[in-house]
Every structure is written in C-alpha cells, then in structure tokens.
Amino acid sequence: MTDVAYKERSAFSGPSSGEPQTPHHSKQAMLTVDFSTPAAAAPPRADRLKQMTANHPAFDRSRLTQEILVRVQHALRRMPGVSGQDANELVTSLQEVGQIVNQETTQLVDALMNLSLDQEDSEQAMARMSLEANLAQAQNKDQAQLIHKLRTEARAEQEKRGEAEAAARTALDKVDALAEELKRVKESVNKTADDLVQVGESASRPGSPRRQQDRRVTPSWGPVECRQVVRREPMAADSTTTPIRESEMAFVREEDPLRLELRLP
C-alpha cells in the first residue's frame, strides 16, 4: 500500500521541471506573437512561465484534491465487503481522475500564464507604439515649425533681394545719368575749344582792325589770363620810316594743362 500510495502521489503531483507542459490551445497562443520583439526574447519568456506556474495557487488545490483521492483509494482497499477486483478497478478509475485533474490544471495554468504574458507584451507594444506616435508627432511639429521658419526666412531674403535689385537699378540709373552729363561736358569743352581756335584764326587775319588787339576772349569753362606783349624792333640807320610795332595778345588758361595762345598782330 505504501508503494502504491507513493506512485499515486507521484502521478498526481505537479508538473516536473524537465518536461514542460503544453496547453491544448498553444496554437492559439502562437497566433498572438508580437513580431516586433526580437527572437532572443523567447528564453526569458519560458523562464518567466516556469517561475509563474511554479507557485500558482491552482497547484495547491490540485494537490489537496490528489490527497483526497489517495485517501479514498486507501479507504476502498480497507473497506469490508468489497472484493479485491472491484477495489482495484475503483482505484484505477480514481488514479485516472487524478491524472486528468493534474493535466487539466497544468494546461489551464499554462494557458493563463501565456495569456498574462501576451497581455503584458500587448501593453508594452501599445506603450511603445504610443511613444513612437508621440515622437513622430513631435518630429512632425518640429518639421512644420522648421518649414515655417524657412519660408519666413526665404520671404525675407526675397524682400531683401528685391530691395537690393531696386538699389542696384537706381545706382545704374545714376551712373548712366553721370555718364550722359560727362559726355555733355566733354562735348561742351570740345565746342568751346573749337570756338577759341576760330576766334584766334579770325583775329590773326591781316585785314582785321587794330581795335581787336585789346579784345579779351573769356571762355565759359574757366578763367583766362590775357597778356599783351609789345615788341619794338630797332630802326635802321638809313631808314626814314617809323619803327614797326607789333602787338601780340596771348590767352592762357591757368588750370588747364592744355596751353592755348592766340597771337593777334
């Protein structure tokens, strides 16, 4: 009886650590695998399952049930009026019941632990997805702010470019105006020089009157220094005529490096 009781206790005891118990709906549990987790997370999950199932309260109740069944078996064997064959059949039936209870308890506990781990993994995945969504939203906000800032800077740069182009056009217009004015001044200077040459030529003609000797020509482009030079030639010994007097009018501009002299007889 002692050996039989020991075998019955060993048969009704909890799951052994060497043989992992597989629940009937393990295929359903595999359908909820989180593919975002790496493959290296499988061993820690198995270790966690062992730790969670080892001290589950369901196994304590299962052991109490097994002890009750063992006592019933002993009572049947000692019960008077019961043949040995009937007692053995009843004991065998009770042992099968104990095994069924043990297996079902193990499978239920494994399924419950797998469900708990799946729920934890789902919550972690949801938290991770929420965190990623918040990060993505923050990145989108940062990008939107950056785009708005870049657009504002681009608009400001366009305005500055327009102002610079307007200033450049104004400067070019001023340069063109200065070039035109310089051209007109050069033409005026050339025209004044031609007028002075013509005046000098007309004054140097033989038929011009003497009163033109004292004529002063003042051009419009600067002060003119007028100088009269009188030359006297010595009179010949045998000559009875008066000495010839030649007058020269010289017009010299002080600032201009071009020196222009007009000689008037």
Image (cartoon, rainbow, N blue to C red):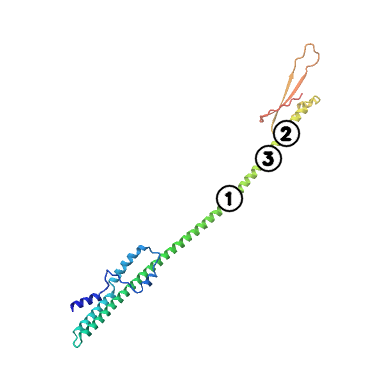
Q: Residue furthest bottom?
A: 81
Q: Residue at x 51, y 57 (%)?
A: 147
Reading the image, the residue beneath label 1 is 161
Percent coordinates x, y for residue 62 in the rendering: 27, 77
Give neighbour class at mark 1: few <14, some 14-19, many 20+ (Cα, 10 Å).
few
Q: Nearer the viewer, residue 238 or 67?
A: 67
Q: Residue at x 24, y 83 (%)?
A: 89
Residue type pointed to by label 1: Arg
> Residue 242, located in which quarter of the rendered image?
top right
Residue type pointed to by label 3: Glu
Q: Nearer the viewer, mark 3 or mark 1?
A: 1
For the residues labelled 1 and 2, the Cα–Cα distance comes to 46 Å
Percent coordinates x, y for residue 13 in the rendering: 25, 75
Question: Of helix, strand and loop, which one carries label 1?
Answer: helix
Reading the image, the residue beneath label 3 is 181
Asked if residue 182 lies left or right of residue 115, the reply is right
Are the residues tagged 1 and 2 within 8 Å (C-beta)?
no
- Which quadrant would the C terminus be assigned to in this image? top right
For the residues labelled 3 and 1, the Cα–Cα distance comes to 30 Å
Task: Give the mark nearest the N terminus, 1 or 2.
Answer: 1
Asked if residue 21 lies left or right of residue 139, the reply is left
Question: Of helix, strand and loop, which one carries label 3?
Answer: helix
Percent coordinates x, y for residue 27 in the rendering: 37, 72
> Residue 36, located in which quarter of the rendered image?
bottom left
When the figure is inspected, residue 197 is found, relative to residue 89, above or below; the finding is above
Give neighbour class at mark 3: few <14, some 14-19, many 20+ (Cα, 10 Å).
few
Residue type pointed to by label 2: Thr
Reading the image, the residue beneath label 2 is 192
Q: Nearer the viewer, residue 220 or 32?
A: 32
Task: Give the mark nearest the N terminus, 2 or 3.
Answer: 3
